[in-house]
Amino acid sequence: MKIAVYGATGYQAGLVLAELVRRGAPVVLVGRDGERLARTAARLAAVPAAAGPAARPGGPSDAPGPSEDGGIEVRVADAADHAALTAAFDGCAAVINCAGPFTVSGGTVADAAVSAGCHYVDTSGEQLHIKRVFDTLGARAERAGVGVVPAATDGCVPVDLLARLLAERLAEPVEEIFSVHRITGGGTPSRGSLRSALASLKVIGSGGLAYRDGDWRSGAPARRTSVRLPGDAAPVPVVRFPLPEVVTIPRHVNVRCVEGLAEATLTARLSTPLPPETIDALPAGPAEEDRRAQRFTYVVEAAGVTGRMLRGVIRGRDTYGTTAVIAVEAARRLVADPPGPGVLVPAQAFDPADFLASLVPHGVDWTIGPADG
């Protein structure tokens, strides 16, 4: 079961590859620079296979075994070269795309994965890329018999799954769902994250897409201007923010309105992005001790037509490390137990409670209870 990782020399990809190697999965490193890929492969060769539980307590025990050829291959292909990409993915069961900005090149990688007959996931949080994958690749993925799950990240997957559980527990038509992300600590974001934010600056400034009455639209005012987050004594100001679950939730929950929110201070910080030359001079990503100190809280609130409201809360640590676990677990499940072909949201591809349970040993916990009102 070879898993190809595109953008294999990047920061997030390094964590994804380490997770794959710890599980004993044969990997194919794909990217533009053969020399950098070779150096990455040499570093990976020193990582003990199937050491997941030691590296991240409670890791999966059903990891595939290593391949006969040592488990690590290198293939060179540019994202702009469809034929080379398709050839690079040949013989792989799945592709994990870690190369942002995804709005610029993510669609071509996803398209090549489908052409090669591979299941596909990516680590994008870019709202427009995710929607474009749904809009353009569904029919081709169905004909190819593969599953495509964009936004296999620490934020989108747990929030999307929890939204399904909230809707089921409401047991009535859903009027509205909103989500809020709060992340504290973690050091400087990776260069890839900063470049993606720079490429999405206009989308971030506009608040991105919201879902209203059967369609996604931009420019709609936020339905809420403040939210009380867990642990806070008072509500905090929030604004609309282009969260990926705004694209995914309406595809499996019959809901009238969905929007993503963020603290107003976050949008203010992102409105003055770092210039490209400054980003290039930064470290590839946060140090391990910074990642371990990072905490995230994601709130999902659902309101039924009768006014009943439920709140789900997801807590965890280390967004980059959690994304690596989620992306690898998503790819593994697509291969081991295919949910059916097409472009799928997390709640369509995976059993929500079971997938969430698989994250608990990795420091992710979740609760459902009454909403704040």
Image (spheres, rainbow, N blue to C red):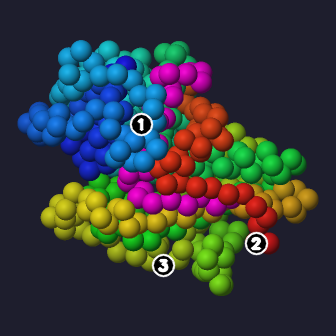
Q: Earlier in the sequence, mark 3 or mark 2?
A: 3
- In this rendering, the count of numbered labels is 3
Residue with the mark numbered 3:
265
Query: Does the magenta segment cover residue 328?
Result: yes
Q: Which residues are magenta?
A: 312-341
Q: Label 3, label 2: how many angstroms apart (C-alpha)?
A: 22 Å
Q: Give the amino acid at mark 2.
A: Asp
Q: Position of residue 111 (x, y in %)?
A: 40, 28
Badge 2 crowding class, 10 Å Cα cut-off, few under 14, some 14 to 19, many 20 or more, is few
Percent coordinates x, y for residue 276 in the rendering = 22, 63
Marks 3 & 2, CB-CB < 8 Å contact? no
Q: CA distance from mark 3 to mark 1?
A: 32 Å
Task: Name the residue: 59% across, 43% down.
Answer: 357
**Is the C terminus in the top left, top right, bottom left or bottom right quadrant?**
bottom right
Question: Who is closer to the viewer here, 157 or 49?
Answer: 49
Nearest to viewer (mark 3 / mark 1): 1
Give residue 280's quadrant in the image.
bottom left
Q: Residue at left 36%, top 62%?
A: 292
The CA distance from mark 2 to mark 1 is 35 Å
Give me the disc on residue 328: 1
Callout 3 amino acid: Thr
Percent position of residue 26, x then y: 29, 24
In the displayed image of the protein, which residue is found farthest to the left? 35
Q: Is residue 6 magenta?
A: no
Residue position marked by numbered label 2 in the rendering: 372
For residue 81, side relative to residue 321 (left or right): left
